[in-house]
Amino acid sequence: MSLLALDELHVHYGAIHALKGISVRVERGQIVALVGANGAGKSTALRAVSGLLRPSGGTITFDGKSLAGVAPHDVVRFGVSHVPEGRIVFANLTVRDNLDLGAYLRRDRAGIQEDREKIFRLFPRLLERKNQASGTLSGGEQQMLAIGRAMMARPTLLLMDEPSLGLAPILVREIFSVIREIRDRGTTIVLVEQNARQALAIADIGYVLETGTIRLCDRGAALLDNPYVQECYLGGGAA
Amino acid sequence: MQELLQQLANGIAWGSIYALIALGYTMVYGILRLINFAHGDIYMVGAFAAYYLARLTNAGGANPSPALALAILLGSMLICALLGVAMEYFAYRPVRKSSRLTALITAIGVSLFLENLGIRLFGADPKFFPQLIAPRSISLGGVMVTNHQITVVIVSVLLMVSLSLFIQRTRTGKAMRAVSFNRDAASLMGIPVNRIITITFAIGSALAAAAGVLVGLTNPKIEPLMGIMPGVKAFVAAVLGGIGSVPGAVIGGLLMGVSEYLVVGYLSSTYRDAIAFVILILVLLVKPAGLFGRNIAEKV
């Protein structure tokens, strides 16, 4: 059984039909990338899984349980964490408080402490700034904090929305290597990206979304070699 | 000099009450971006709740007991906390996804409802608030203060310090700040946003109730429309301090109280109410974000 299964998922924003019946499978331990242009429905799919949007049709099954219509704060209890687009760290709180809020539903102080230290090992720059208001961090540091904060819930599945957006190339590489590391430590990842090349390079499976439907689905490496993907999403050049 | 110190002492005691009310405005604004115009009326209900609790328990007789006074204060805070929760649930939650103007008009409606319900239930004529603590005047280096004023300041400071610790240190307090920053992102942490909003209304309303009881102590005439003017002035205090800012509400409230008494002492008590609006206009002209207005650098 897949860890996450979207079946014929529809989402409407008022009159706009943003997702027109997409089906996605995510197996345990995979990185699954959803790539596509602005407005293709990638973020919409993530927001439906995490409960921020209510689907108008279809099913979302996580670990055998239905997630459709579950409130966002309850979805976290199922073991699904969402790193939102634009990071949205709590700028008025310190780095440490942001991480602690990521563990809001947990009561095991020792475990929280341990995970906080793990995050600081993964992102040493956050440790240096742990008592700083997170609004003062750079964009890359905020992205690290947003990822660390989501990991504090000890999720089984991590949903990541455009983690590379607006970052310098060196930081993009760093973020992608962290994503791989998180997966290697056992967290399954669904990655939404406009940076198709990087995303497909680390993805086991990739889906190409176009205007609310799935255009292609294949192994990440195969999509990188696909002439259509190269033409439309990789700038027409050789990878 | 003596005169100035005297007016400052009066102003600080009075300003503490504004500060307590302003805290509720600023907390609710911080979390919902809603100016809860009914907040001044909660303060009125707080005073009446204490009035009836005092009558029920025969407090304020010949031998006032401080323990009973404290119990009445807490009882009134609890009643208003529940009222605040009900107000949010029945009036504001249904319009939360509508425009801010809808919510604002709803708040004015709730305010009128509470005022008129107050007139219906309590009667329009003023009631004499019982003496929960026997009055005494104390001279501090020539400045005359009453033990009631001292009580007001002490209780206010205790409440403000507790609130500040709660918001800064506790898990729920941090969740409140997260919800106030971004509701969706907070819910993605597993924070139950509706429950946090409920808690915010409960705390803000309890603080207003405390202000109502304290004002009954120092100005023992209470009536159902007593919340209108202090409500407006505490709102100005919150704007002066920077709406959404908790320390701003406290400073704003104290500044309002002190400037009111300076006007009374040095100009004329006729202008006592006008100063609030002068301050409001000046703030909006010079520093619309208020003294502690939030200007957080958000990098994208």
Image (spheres, coloured by chain):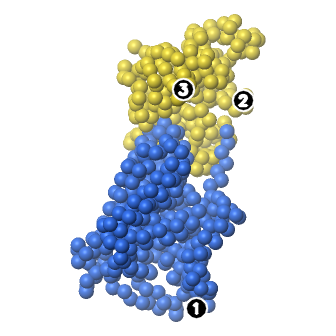
Chain colours: A yellow, B blue
Around disc 1, counting alpha carbons within 10 Å, would you say few (fewer than 14), some (14 to 19), or many (20 or more)? few
Around disc 3, counting alpha carbons within 10 Å, would you say few (fewer than 14), some (14 to 19), or many (20 or more)? few
- The image position of residue A146, as x and y in percent, is 57, 37
Task: Give the residue number, with chain letter if any, for mark 3.
Answer: A15
Relative placement, left or right, of A191 versus B64 is right
Mark 3 falls on what kind of element?
loop
- The image position of residue A204, as x and y in percent, is 56, 14
- The image position of residue B144, as x and y in percent, is 48, 90
- Can residue B71 be seen here? The reply is yes
- Spatial CA span between label 1 and label 2: 67 Å
Which comes before the other along the chain, label 2 or label 3? 3
Task: Give the residue number, with chain letter if any, for mark 1.
Answer: B2
Return the chain for callout 3.
A
In the picture shown, does residue A119 fall above or below A206? Answer: below
User: Which residue shows up at 56% across the image and 33% down it?
Assistant: A84
- Nearer to the camera, A43 or B219: B219
Marks 1/2 in contact by CB < 8 Å: the verdict is no
Around disc 2, counting alpha carbons within 10 Å, would you say few (fewer than 14), some (14 to 19), or many (20 or more)? few
Return the chain for callout 1.
B
Amino acid marked by disc 1: Gln
Amino acid marked by disc 2: Ile
> What numbered label is drawn on residue A170?
2
- Can residue A182 be seen here? The reply is no
Q: Quadrant of residue B240?
A: bottom right
Mark 2 falls on what kind of element?
helix
